[in-house]
Amino acid sequence: MLPEVASDNLAKPDLKALFFGFSSVGLSGFGGVLPFARRMLVEERCWMTAEEFNAQLGLCQFLPGPNVVNLAVLVGKRQCGLAGAVVAPLGLLGGPILIVLILGWLYDLYGNLPLAQSMLRGIAAVGCGLLFAMAWRMGMAIKERWVFLPFTILVVTAIAWLRWPMPLVMLAGLVLSGGVAFWRLGRR
Amino acid sequence: MSLVIDLYLEFTLLAFVAFGGATALLPEMHRVVVENHHWLDDATFTHLYAIAQAAPGPNVLVVTLIGWKVAGLPGALAATLAMCLPMSIAIYLLYDRWERFAGQRWQRAIQLGVAPLAVGLIFSGAALIAQSVGLGWAASALVVLTVVINLRTKLHPLWLIALGAMLGLLELI
C-alpha cells in the first residue's frame, strides 16, 4: 500500500473538492501542468505530503500516458475510490477540452485564412523550439549518458528517418535499453 | 461511425506506448493520422499542434483536436478517451501493488531504459514540426531563440508563444 494519508495537517477532499481542485490545475498551465498539480495537492489544499506526492508521481511516470492524468486518477482513487478516480481527471480535463473544442471550431471557421495559418505556423515554430529544449533537458538528466544516448540516436533514426512504427520501435528499444539498464544497475 | 471506431482503436494503441507523455507521440500520431490514414494533411496537423500548444491544459489535448478535425465531436471525445482510458485503468488497478515493485531492479531498469527512448521521440517530434513549419530564416531563428530562452531563463513559454503568434501574424514566418 502507498503510505496512508495519516499526517495531522492533511485534509481529505470530497468529490466536489477533487473536481474543482483538479479543474484549477488543468486551467492553470499551458502544457506543463504538473507543477501546478503539486502545488495544489501538497501546498494549497494539503491533501498529501511531499513524500506521498513523489511516491504517487513515481507510478504515474513509470506507466505510459500523460502523467498528470494518471496522477488525477491515482489521487482520485486514494481519496474517494472509483468515483474519485473518475471525477478527478474529469475536473482536470473538462475545462481544457471545452476550450480546445471551441478553438477547434474557430479553426474550422477561420483556419483557411492565410493570416490564421501563418499565425499558427509561428506558434508551431515556438512549439518546435520548446520540444528541442525539452529533449535537451531530458537528455542531460540521464546518468551514464555515454551508455544510453546511443539508444536516443537509434530511436531518432528509426522514427524520424526510417518511419518505422512506434510500437515496434518502443518494444525493441525497451528490451535493449532496459536490458542495458538492468545490467548497469547490477554493476553499481 | 467506423471512422470514430478506427480513431478510437488507433489512439488506444498509442496510449500503450506513450512513454514520455503525449508529446512523445507526435511522430507516431503523424505517421498514423497523416501518412497512413490520410485523415489530415501535414499543414493541418501542424496547425492543430500549435493550437494545442497555445491552449491551456495538458498537451495531450492535441488528440482531442485531431479527433475533432477527423470526425467532429464524437471523434474528439473518442480520441481523448482512447488516449486516457487504458492507463487510467492500469493505474487504478496497480496502485496497491506499486510499493511492492517500486525500487525493484527490473522496475528501475525499465524506468532508466525508457528515458533515452523518450528523448529520441521528443527530438523526432521536434524535427517533424520543424520540417512542417518550413525552415525559413525567420522560423529557424525563432526556433533557436526559443531553445535558448527556454533553457537559459525562466520566462514562461506563453510569452514565446505570443511572440511566435505575433511574428506569424506579421507574416514573417
Image (spheres, rainbow, N blue to C red):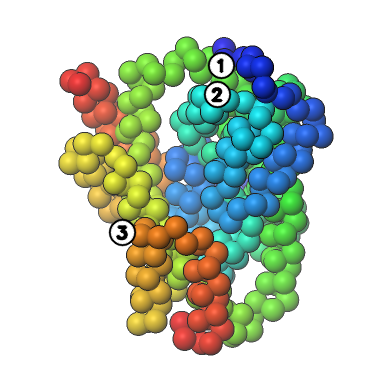
Q: Position of residue B59 (x, y in %)?
A: 56, 53
Q: What chain does badge 1 belong to?
A: A
- Residue A161 is labelled as 3
Task: Determine whether B130 is above or below A80 in the image.
Answer: below
Q: Nearer the viewer, residue B29 or A27?
A: A27
Q: Classify residue A53 as left or right of residue B103.
A: right
The amino acid type found where label 2 is placed reads Glu
> Which class describes the residues within 10 Å of circle 3: few (<14), some (14-19), or many (20+)?
few
Q: Whole-Å distance between the Cαs marked 1 and 2?
A: 8 Å
SS type, badge 2: helix
Residue with the mark numbered 2:
A52
Q: Name the residue located 21 percent from the left edge and 25 percent from the top edge.
A: A184
Residue A37 in percent (x, y) is at: 60, 40
Number of other residues with Cα within 10 Å of mark 1, as a class: few under 14, some 14 to 19, many 20 or more: some
Q: Chain of mark 3?
A: A
Q: Which residue is mark 1?
A: A2
* Within-10-Å neighbours for mark 2: few <14, some 14–19, many 20+: some
Q: Position of residue B42 (x, y in %)?
A: 50, 69
Report, in whole angstroms, how far the alpha carbon at label 2 lies from the one at label 3.
41 Å
Label 1 sits on a secondary structure element that is loop
* Cβ–Cβ under 8 Å for marks 1 and 2: yes
Classify B7 as above or below A4. Answer: below
Residue A106 drawn at (x, y percent): 72, 72
The amino acid type of the residue labelled 3 equals Trp
Q: Are marks 2 and 3 in contact (CB under 8 Å)?
A: no
